[in-house]
Amino acid sequence: MPEQPNTRRGRVEAMRKREQAKQRRRTSALVAVGTAVAIVIVFVIVGATTKSTPKAAATSPANASVVAALAAVPESVINTVGAGSGVTGPTSTSGAKLTSDGKPRVAYVGAEYCPYCAAERWALAQALSRFGTFSGLGTTTSSSTDVYPSTATLDFHGSTYTSPYLVFTPYEEEDGSAQPLDTVPADIAALHTTIGGGTYPFVDLGGTAYIKGASYDPALLKGLTQAQIAQALSDPSSPVAKAVIAVANRITAQLCTLTGNQPANVCSASGVTAAASATS
Amino acid sequence: MTTAPAGPRTVAPGRLIAFGLSLLGAALAAYLTYEHYTGNRTLACSGHGTIDCAKVTTSSESVIVGVPVAVWGLVFFAGMIVLTQPLAWRRPDLHRVRLGAAGLGFAFVLYLVYTELVTLHAICLWCTGVHLVTLALLVTLLMVDPWEASPP
């Protein structure tokens, strides 16, 4: 700190220096702000030009063995896994009943690039396979540039589901490149927004319960192919089965409330009743 | 130790603003830390959006050297609270430390903004709040005259 001048000339000089220092500080601040703005603008431009529309993976029809393995999970596995642990299930809601053709309707909204959808599809498809039959199921992987990259999964886009008990209407709203794919009808879009908060995946189970997000950790599927995941579902000791089947049991328990506990063999399985107790 | 000269018993507004910004930044970082450990495990993708806090705060880039970025932010602002609290202004020689820390913090912010915009293509608004507070803190500290009289 400079000494305090005691002459008039000295005071004037000191005042001039203080003004200069003040000006330097202002300039420094302006330079900092200007530099920050310029750098952020560069980042925005670079980000926009390199925008990895999430890197799309090829979609293809599901191998018949994958679909078969999905539908043929032994009851012993279902019962052994039961409600499981470390997973979540549907959340009850008191909205209007969701039906189609006089049957309870299950609606799914997701996106092909979405890693959480990748995880949830396995459990949802496995549960629905207990009530009906899929055809035209595809396979894909989630975005390679998002979290849980390239998670192997099924693809509901273009699939059809036939069941005497339920109607399933899936919408893959965006494809692997985050481009529009399936058009979500207004009624489901409204539910997706109000109940699901607009997030993927969103599943509405007949208007009585919903799923928002993945019900288990997608990391469990890391490095596995569709065939390996499908195969693991029949091994009650595998972490994949413990998670996927547990969630499927919880979804099944909820669906059984919609179908009047039909089919009886599905709804009376001890794994499903255990899941019902865990989620009620 | 160098001390500031005696002067009027007022606290320079810039110093109060810097202290307030440090407190605000710490509050935001504390919230993000809390969310990191408890609240953001929604395991969901935001539909359509670039604004996606969960994507940012759950990404692999959200942890550096095994420590969540939010915790780094909390440590930074805790340090800045110490450096900008009223008593600390009695030592003008600390100002270089303040400026150095704020500059370092802002460089880190630029890295995080790069990660958000270029790597993740997603923006977390809470994180952006922290980034703006860090910039404001740096600018405020640049404007402050550390030799201006301090309250006794």
Image (cartoon, coloured by chain):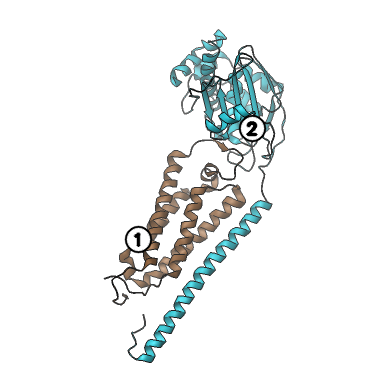
Name the residue located 44 percent from the left edge and 63 percent from the top edge.
B101
- The amino acid on which the numbered mark 2 sits, given as a three-letter code, is Ala
Q: Residue type at mark 1?
A: Val
Q: Which chain is cyan?
A: A
Q: Residues within 10 Å of mark 2 (few under 14, many from 20)?
A: many
| Mark in the foreground, 2 or 1 | 1
Pinpoint the chain carrying mark 2: A
Q: In the image shown, does A194 or B53 lie closer to the viewer? A: A194
Q: Chain of mark 1?
A: B
Residue A10, image x and y in percent?
38, 89
Task: Tell me: residue A6, above or below residue A212.
Answer: below
- Which residue is identified by label 2? A152
Q: Residue at x 57, y 9 (%)?
A: A263
Please tell me whether residue A146 is drawn above or below residue A204 in the rendered image: below
The kind of secondary structure element at disc 2 is strand
Q: Is residue B63 visible?
A: no
Q: Residue sitting at 60 percent across and 27 percent down?
A: A188
Residue A230: where, in percent of width, then height? 63, 24
Name the image quarter holding the C terminus of chain B: bottom left
The colour chain B appears in is brown
Q: Where is the N terminus of chain B found, in terms of image quarters?
A: bottom left
Which residue position holds label 1? B82
- Measured as percent of width and height from the top left, residue A233 is found at 58, 22
Q: Nearer the viewer, residue A68 or B28?
A: B28
Which type of secondary structure does the marked residue at label 1 adopt? helix
Picture layout, residue A216 above or below residue B9? above
Residue A111 spot, x, y in % from top left: 64, 34
